[in-house]
Image: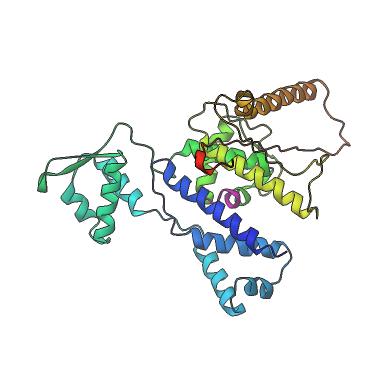
């Protein structure tokens, strides 16, 4: 069977996730580089799988020279920061609040007028900006519930770097920049903050410097850790599938140590087992937390021998609950 339908379906689901992330927090981050990033990342991963440039170019439906030129162009521009007009207008109103409408129009006169009006309307409808006055006296101000501009919250980004250091450490600054798709100065600033907090360690004799995180826990109820949590969840899920595929195994077994399972429980409100099904995630989380506590306690009293191979078991658990239209259910 061709894997093309599976690839298409995975791309579709990933696009849904990206679109939700790009709008779910009330922000409108720039997506102008997503297509370029996908091409560059995919090309690099295919090369790491051992494919030649000729084969990779063919898979993209490109001539070899065109493919090589494209890769070179993206390598030269990698790391160029870009943000959406929405972010720029939001930041301007945030720093100049209150600001007259005519001043905003003058500040962004070089932009497409239709898009600019749409951005202002979206900021108003989303509740991040308030409008008062009329005509030339119209002014904008940010609301008290105004969120941090996307990509400008250093603490939230530091948590993503913490997850990356835990999953991929010991890792160099360049490697962590690649994993987080961020500029080196931004990652370096996050690492300095994490080092000061004692959450990350630096190998003393490594050159270049390598960073690692022995323990990474995002507490329940942590409002500032959701980006890092999603990054961690998605990374763990992909790691499980990739590890399974690279092992050459194409089927599941009850004794598998690598893989995943999906359980779908179709029931109704008031069903005798509804609470057990709804509490499935809580039950598995409790087991995982208990197991981690017992492992940590044992490690503290009985350190492993120096000659044994260390293991890291990454288990991912997710759950979604949706209400279905009764007309869609089978009789």
- Tell me if residue 297 can be seen: yes
Q: Position of residue 191 (x, y in %)?
A: 56, 40
Q: Is residue 32 above or below residue 213?
A: below
Residues drawn in magenta: 177-182
Quarter holding the N terminus is: bottom right
What is the magenta segment's predominant secondary structure?
helix
Residue at the front extreme, as displayed: 331
Residue 197 left/right relative to 51? left
Q: Residue at x 49, y 35 (%)?
A: 155
Residue at position x 68%, y 73% from top?
55
Question: In x, y percent, where is residue 76?
Answer: 52, 66
Q: Residue at x 70, y 65 (%)?
A: 2
Q: Quadrant of the C terminus?
A: top right
Q: Is residue 107 left or right of residue 273?
A: left
Q: Nearer the viewer, residue 89 or 262?
A: 262
**Most foreground residue, 126 or 159:** 126
Q: Does the stretch in magenta take in 145?
A: no
Can residue 210 be seen in the rendering of this structure?
no
| Residue 170 x %, y % | 69, 43
Tell me if residue 103 comes above or below residue 65 in the rendering: above
> As displayed, is residue 67 above or below residue 34?
below
Residue 152: quadrant of the picture: top left
């Amino acid at each position: 069977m061709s894997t093309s339908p599976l690839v298409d379906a995975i791309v579709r689901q990933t696009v849904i996730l990206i679109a939700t992330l790009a709008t779910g927090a009330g922000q409108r981050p720039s997506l102008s580089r997503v297509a370029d990033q996908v091409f560059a990342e995919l090309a690099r991963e295919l090369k790491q799988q051992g494919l030649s440039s000729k084969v990779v170019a063919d898979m993209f439906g490109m001539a070899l020279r065109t493919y090589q030129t494209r890769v070179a162009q993206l390598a030269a521009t990698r790391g160029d920061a870009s943000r959406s007009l929405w972010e720029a207008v939001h930041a301007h109103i945030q720093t100049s609040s209150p600001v007259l409408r005519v001043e905003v129009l003058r500040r962004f006169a070089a932009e497409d007028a239709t898009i600019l009006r749409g951005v202002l309307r979206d900021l108003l409808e989303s509740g991040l900006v308030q409008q008062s006055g009329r005509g030339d006296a119209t002014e904008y101000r940010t609301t008290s519930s105004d969120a941090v501009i996307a990509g400008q919250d250093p603490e939230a980004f530091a948590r993503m770097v913490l997850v990356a250091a835990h999953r991929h450490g010991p890792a160099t600054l360049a490697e962590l920049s690649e994993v987080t798709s961020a500029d080196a100065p931004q990652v370096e600033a996050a690492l300095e903050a994490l080092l000061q907090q004692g959450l990350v360690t630096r190998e003393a004799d490594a050159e270049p410097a390598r960073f690692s995180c022995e323990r990474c826990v995002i507490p329940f109820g942590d409002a500032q850790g959701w980006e890092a949590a999603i990054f961690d969840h998605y990374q763990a899920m992909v790691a499980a599938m990739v590890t399974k595929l690279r092992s050459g195994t194409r089927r599941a077994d009850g004794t598998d140590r690598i893989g995943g399972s999906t359980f779908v429980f179709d029931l109704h409100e008031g069903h005798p087992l509804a609470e057990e099904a709804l509490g499935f995630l809580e039950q598995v989380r409790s087991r995982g937390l208990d197991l981690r506590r017992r492992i940590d306690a044992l490690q503290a009293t009985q350190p492993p021998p120096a000659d044994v191979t260390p293991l890291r078991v990454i288990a991912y658990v997710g759950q979604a609950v949706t209400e279905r239209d009764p007309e869609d259910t089978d009789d």
